[in-house]
Image (tube, rainbow, N blue to C red):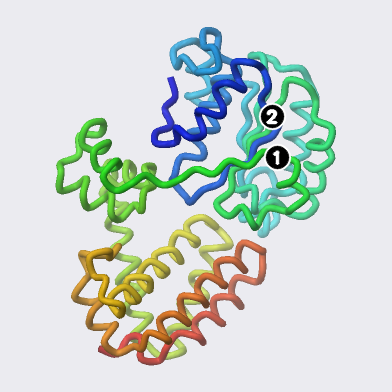
């Protein structure tokens, strides 16, 4: 039983390949944060090792349950911050992480039939780590599958991409997500409507927010901090830049989520400038958005959106995060916080 939801277009490709033993040795699973990449990766690991399934995980055998619990000896998850002591290792998958994973898969599977290596945040591999992995992808050992998870496919080295089969996970529609939250996760219709709008089709985020009030509280705090920064002078904006850069050095995904909040806010400003209020992401802040939009031109909003996108792309390319954020703050319209 697949626990991934809303990715039927991918399952239709995976199931026949798994049933016939024609699966690739390496897949690149791409999509925005919380869209289900890790869920799909673990489902694939289950399907490969399942004692009962025919290309589909049964979810009940010892292999499936141990993989779901994170206790399976042949399924290894590698993510930034593991196994190395340097500061950069907290935001990158380093050479030692890859070497250890490759050492393990050089041995025969111990517990199941197939070893699976899941690289969570494949775009954050160091050059040395990517080159070490590349050699193995070119000549993969038998009974091994590599699953590379990436939020930004373009940030993964082309040589790595070319040796993987790329699969893109797509966000759910608003209606489909709202229905799922009500029927499977006991959300009220009002909660489902609100979360389906905020999550932008990423079920993992919506489920997390439904079960943990701190998720929405953190969103509110981040939006309030953003407003304070918009209304402040350059010194405060630089202080904020340093805070985000420090966060990036310690929790890369959290920093990227924070910049995504900025991007969605400025997208909403553009929608208001264009008279498309019905499509606002932050509809609960509509009055604040309209007040701010009144002091900005459409050109200023578009220009800053482009700057934000460039900054997020540059951070994926491992530029100096403090410098990238300071440049972003320098390009923030002076009038952005004046309403």
SS type, badge 1: loop
Residue at figure coordinates x 28%, y 54% from the top left: 197
Give how far apart the Cα atoms at labels 1 and 2 are.
8 Å
Residue 56 coordinates in the image, percent (x, y):
51, 18
User: Above or below — where is 10 with respect to 218?
Assistant: above
SS type, badge 2: loop
Residue at figure coordinates x 15%, y 48% from the top left: 190
Q: How many marks?
A: 2
Residue 149 coordinates in the image, percent (x, y):
59, 43
Residue 250 coordinates in the image, percent (x, y):
55, 58
- Give the quarter of the figure containing the N terminus: top left
- Give the quarter of the figure containing the C terminus: bottom left
Q: Disc 1 or 2, which lies upstream in sequence?
A: 2
User: Above or below — where is 317 with respect to 4?
Assistant: below
Q: Which residue is situated farthest in the top direction here?
A: 52
> Which corner quadrant of the image does residue 8 belong to?
top left
Q: In the shown orientation, is residue 193 left or right of residue 261?
A: left
Viewer-proximal residue among 122 and 323 = 122
Mark 2 neighbour class, 10 Å CA radius: few under 14, some 14 to 19, many 20 or more: some
Give the residue number, with chain letter if any, for mark 1.
164
Give the residue number, with chain letter if any, for mark 2.
24
Residue at figure coordinates x 44%, y 63% from the top left: 260
Viewer-proximal residue among 63 and 170 = 170
Q: Look at the numbered discs 1 and 2 and tell me whether their residues touch, using CB distance below 8 Å.
A: yes
Mark 1 neighbour class, 10 Å CA radius: few under 14, some 14 to 19, many 20 or more: some
Residue at figure coordinates x 45%, y 17% from the top left: 59
Q: In the shown orientation, is residue 329 left or right of residue 174?
A: right
> Which corner quadrant of the image does residue 301 belong to?
bottom left
Residue 227: numbered disc: none
């Amino acid at each position: 039983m697949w626990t991934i939801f809303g990715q039927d277009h991918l399952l239709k490709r995976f199931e026949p390949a798994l049933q016939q033993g024609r699966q690739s040795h390496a897949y690149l699973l791409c999509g925005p944060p919380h869209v289900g990449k890790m869920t799909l990766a673990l489902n694939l690991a289950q399907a490969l090792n399942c004692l009962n399934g025919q290309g589909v995980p049964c979810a009940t055998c010892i292999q499936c349950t141990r993989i779901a619990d994170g206790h399976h000896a042949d399924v290894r998850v590698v993510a930034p911050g593991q196994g190395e002591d340097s500061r950069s290792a907290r935001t990158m998958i380093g050479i030692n992480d890859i070497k250890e994973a490759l050492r393990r898969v050089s041995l025969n599977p111990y517990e199941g039939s197939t070893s699976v290596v899941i690289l969570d945040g494949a775009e954050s591999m160091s050059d040395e780590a990517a080159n070490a992995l590349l050699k193995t992808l070119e000549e993969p050992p038998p009974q091994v599958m590599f699953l590379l998870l990436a939020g930004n496919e373009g940030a993964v080295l082309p040589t790595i991409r070319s040796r993987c089969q790329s699969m893109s996970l797509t966000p759910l529609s608003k209606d489909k997500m709202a229905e799922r939250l009500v029927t499977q996760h006991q959300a009220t219709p009002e909660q489902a409507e609100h979360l389906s709008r905020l999550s932008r089709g990423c079920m993992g985020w919506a489920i997390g927010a439904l079960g943990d009030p701190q998720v929405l509280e953190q969103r509110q705090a981040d939006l309030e901090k953003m407003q304070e920064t918009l209304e402040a002078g350059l010194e405060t904006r630089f202080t904020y830049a340093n805070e985000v850069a420090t966060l990036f050095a310690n929790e890369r995904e959290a920093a990227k989520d924070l910049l995504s909040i900025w991007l969605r806010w400025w997208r909403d400003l553009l929608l208001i400038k264009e008279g498309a209020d019905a499509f606002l992401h932050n509809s609960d802040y509509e009055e604040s958005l309209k007040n701010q939009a009144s002091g900005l031109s459409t050109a200023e909003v578009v220009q800053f959106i482009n700057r934000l996108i460039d900054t997020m792309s540059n951070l994926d390319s491992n530029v100096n995060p403090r410098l990238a954020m300071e440049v972003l703050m320098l390009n923030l319209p002076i009038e952005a916080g004046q309403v």
